[in-house]
Image (cartoon, grey):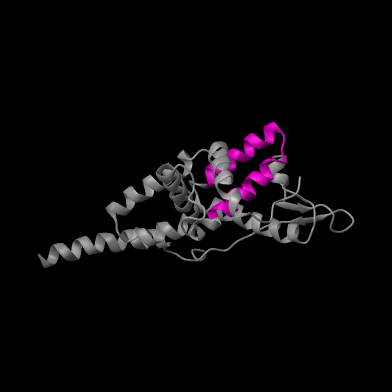
Amino acid sequence: MPFRTSIHDYEIDHLFHRFRHVIGDSNWRQRVKKLEEETRGNKFLRHYHLLENDIAYQLNNCSNLERQHGALPVGRMDLSPVYPALAFASHCLSTLERMDATNRTRAIGRIQGAFRNPEDMRALQLEFTAGLHFAKLGHRLAWPELETGGNTYDLLVEDLGPTGLEVECKAISEEKGRRICTRHALDFWHLMQRHLMAQTV
């Protein structure tokens, strides 16, 4: 089954409905609820959480729109802010459709777990982006780690070269090399603000 490289507007609502059914909207709704609770305790975390968990927030918006309108309001409002999440959903479903039952269950678990760990989510997005590049060129793809559970490379371009091209995806975040990560710095600023405000009262 080919890897999907495009989505039409009329497919958006059905696509989200399928993804919600397969993955479970509790995964992104619970994640956003937890992040919002943290934000109420530290306003400095708001922007950080939105950037680090953009897919979860976008899918949560989709869930809210679906509950409000009965379906995603395609054609009635601008849905472009949630396009990245819908593309991610399409890539996930396109990959899951290729799998047998055992590997499909394993892959669903990995996708669900990615909502709890932004680094894992970025890894999945990077793999799908690499796959999208080769799929648009007309190549056949396989995801060994997702499809067989093997601890190997991330992506196999099956028809490129005599034995296929093995692709290992690696990403470097803004946090790489920092002695103090952004999250800890924001927690520190929150504590400092409380201390400084107490001193000025």
Asked if the stretch drawn in magenta spans residue 180, the answer is no
Q: Quadrant of residue 198?
A: bottom left
Question: Residue at left 35%, top 59%?
Answer: 46
Q: Position of residue 44 (x, y in %)?
A: 32, 61
Q: Picture quarter containing residue 39?
A: bottom left
Q: Is residue 19 placed above or below 101 in the rendered structure?
A: below
Compare residues 131 and 168 and report the one nearer the observer: 131
Q: Residue 15 in the image: x percent, y percent?
A: 59, 45
- Between 13 and 147, the one lying in front of the other is 13
Frontmost residue, 183 versus 9:
9
Residue 35 location in percent, x, y? 38, 50
Q: Residue furthest front?
A: 76
- Magenta span: 85-114
All told, the count of numbered labels is 0
State left or right for residue 162 relative to residue 144.
right
Q: Residue furthest left?
A: 201
| x 79%, y 52%: residue | 140
